[in-house]
Image (tube, rainbow, N blue to C red):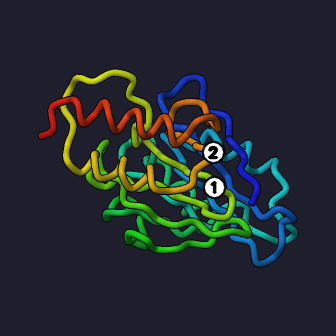
Amino acid sequence: MRVIQLQRSPNTYTCRSYLLLGDWNQIDAVNTLIDPGTDGYIMDEIDTIYTGCGKVPVEQVLLTHNHFDHAASAELFKRKYNATIYGWVPGPGVDVLLKDNQVIKAGDDYLDVLHTPGHSSDSVSFYCQAQKLLFSGDTQLRIRTPGGKYTRDYVETLIKLANKDIEMVYPGHDEPFNHDVRSIILETLQNVRNSEII
């Protein structure tokens, strides 16, 4: 599976969007977009990428959560590409509701759906076990000091992610990173536990 980080609009507050393709653009690969963002800015870039002979550039859209900066343009992708929209909760354009531990083909690989509440109750992350990578959306993996207030759900989310073999993280806003992922998550878990749990 190839991961292409798409360019964000310089004029709009939006998330990072990722296009997942098969390594060789095979006919059975499922061209997948994670978080389409605020507007259709990334459509022009997607249309310049070779996504397979006779294949639609975006066959499905996976939403990490239903906040405006991640999901507002989902219906544009449905209209332009006839893409199926997946989300944890009903929302504009959502066709299929996700379930915890569901497996979805993306590119030529598979993603596990992980319900990861904390940022929002409908937050999910997508984990590719074969490539040891995580699309974390707005699930905060790096909290450097204790303090603040956090939900019990968020503590459970961090425990769940700490138990996965993750070597690469594609966040919803920050730069992707591939160093000391488990150590970062465990440090965050410790700092959250040393804060106020509500």
Label 1 Cα neighbours within 10 Å, binned few <14 / some 14-19 / many ≥20: few
Q: Left or right: where does residue 1 sit relative to residue 164?
A: right
- Image height of 173 relative to 165, above or below: above
* Left or right relative to 150: residue 123: right
Q: Quadrant of the C terminus?
A: top left
Q: CA distance from mark 1 to mark 2?
A: 7 Å
Q: Which mark is residue 179?
A: none
- SS label for mark 1: loop
Residue furthest left in the image = 198
Secondary-structure class at tag 2: strand
- Measured as percent of width and height from the top left, residue 193 is found at 24, 36
Q: Is residue 81 above or below residue 180?
A: below
Query: Mark 2 belongs to which amino acid?
Result: Met
Q: Position of residue 175 (x, y in %)?
A: 60, 30
Q: Earlier in the sequence, mark 1 or mark 2?
A: 1
Above or below residue 121? Residue 54 is below
Please name the residue shown 50% across and 37% down the image. 183
Looking at the picture, how far across and down is residue 138, in whole percent?
Answer: 42, 41
The answer to which of 116 and 166 lies nearer the viewer is 166
| Camera-nearest residue between 91 and 155 | 155
Badge 2: residue crowd in 10 Å (few <14, some 14–19, many ≥20): some
- Do the numbered discs 1 and 2 sit on residues whose CB atoms are within 8 Å? yes
Measured as percent of width and height from the top left, residue 6 is found at 68, 40
Q: Amino acid at mark 1?
A: Lys
Which residue is tagged 2? Answer: 168
